[in-house]
Amino acid sequence: MVRVLGKDLRLPDLVSPESFHSELRSTRLTSQLGIALGVAFAVCFVTGLTSHLIQHPPAWFWWPSRPAGLYRFTQGLHVATGLACVPLLGAKLWSVYPRLFERPAVRSIGHALERASIAALVAAALFQVVGGLLNVSRWYGALPFFFTTGHYWGAWLAVGALLVHIGVKLPTVRDSLARRVADKGPGGISRRELLGTVGAAAGVITLATVGQTVAPLSPVSVLAPRRPTVGPQRLPVNKTAAGAGVRDLALDPAYRLVVRGPDDELSLSLAELASLAQHTVVLPIACVEGWSASGTWSGVRLGDLARMVGLDPGEASAEVESLQQGGRYRVSTVAPTHIRDDWTLIALGLNGEPLHLDHGYPARLIAPNRPGVLQTKWVGRITFRRDK
Ligand SMILES: Nc1nc2c(c(=O)[nH]1)N[C@H]1C(S)=C(S)[C@@H](COP(=O)(O)O)O[C@H]1N2
Ligand SMILES: [Mo]
């Protein structure tokens, strides 16, 4: 026997619904939380799918190079809505969890299917939120699989189960929202107060993290894993040169940028690169993990390099390769839309100084409206192909 909140409980009671009975739980509360969670999840799904398509474009997919900050916005929203799901999901699960102990566990085949779909939904939702949290906290080692693959398939599972769930529950939701119910149980807080608390928790979590992309909020963003202005040259670093194992190659005085076309091949020293027409642009690095930060980049237009090997920038695609020997992000593909864009640079400088080694010295790719993972650092070779 133990005493919990003034009640004497036997151990089996601790896992029985009666011992945690609350007047606050109602179909109406669950419906309202469900709607909020559904909206957050939908925004998170669409923005996440967009990010996935940009990184693994199928033939039909096209992503523009402007507005330059669009990806910064969609991915910031993805991570912010994902984080807001934490209190919403917690409250929603709390509002229904006594159902877990319903007996008989299965009443009919239909009931069994419904319970199975809810089990899949809860598992997928927890998997998505916990996995995403670990990833943005940069606890990469905590997951026994490659995060983005798991997160991608988990999202489809969650969406499928969610659609089934909405289909099954829609009449109940309609009914519970149409009927007025007493807002206050005997003592304790009211449903509105509970909803307000959950909303406030989501707001606090957002404020405490969104400064990783909205610079003016950075001082209050105590939980943000990154700050947009902290790092060498006032910009965060995702992977350092030492971490990528490229220090020696990047600092080698014999460095050459190899630029290949279908017919020509150039080999440019850093001094030769610096003697080409230089351009300056203000563009963000927008990491898939939700942080983003603006920099003032200067360097050579990628389109000019395409011209130097005899290609029209609008008709060429490019493979930009790092000096880094391994790693998932050592190479990225640039589509004609981005090569044609005057803001796409092979940058040699950042914020008025030569690139810091950790930001990709001697040369890195920076292009508008592109995820950080595609902004290849320590570029050693560019291969242009005729696209059409
Ligand atoms: N060669 C190489 N380039 C890379 C990476 C990498 O691991 N290797 N990381 C990418 C990621 S995930 C991001 S968010 C940006 C970050 O750029 P920064 O470190 O200059 O802020 O670099 C990108 N370029
Ligand atoms: Mo990133």
Image: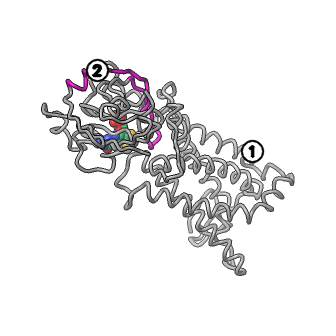
Q: Residue at x 30, y 35 (%)?
A: 309
**In the image: residue 246, left or right of residue 371:** left
Label 2 crowd (10 A; few <14 / some 14-19 / many >=20): few
Residue where numbered disc 2 is placed: 353
- In the displayed image of the protein, which residue is found farthest to the right? 179
- Which residue type carries mark 2? Glu
The region drawn magenta spans: 271-296
SS at mark 1 in the image = helix
Q: Nearer the viewer, residue 182 or 274?
A: 274
Q: Residue 298 in the image: x percent, y percent? A: 34, 23
Front label number (1 vs 2): 2
The location of residue 185, given as percent across then percent down, is: 78, 52
Q: Is residue 83 above or below residue 361?
A: below
| Residue 203, magenta (yes or no) | no
30 vs 368, nearest the viewer: 368
Residue type indicated by callout 1: Arg
User: Which percent across, then down, holds residue 87?
Assistant: 59, 48
> In this figure, which residue is indicated by the disc labeled 1?
192
Q: Examine the rendering and report whether any part of residue 224 can be seen.
A: no
> In this picture, is 121 found above or below 302?
below
Residue drawn where x is 21% and y is 40% of the image? 242
Residue 275: within the magenta? yes
Q: How is the image coloured?
A: one colour
Badge 1: residue crowd in 10 Å (few <14, some 14–19, many ≥20): few
- Is label 1 in contact with label 2 (beta carbons under 8 Å)? no
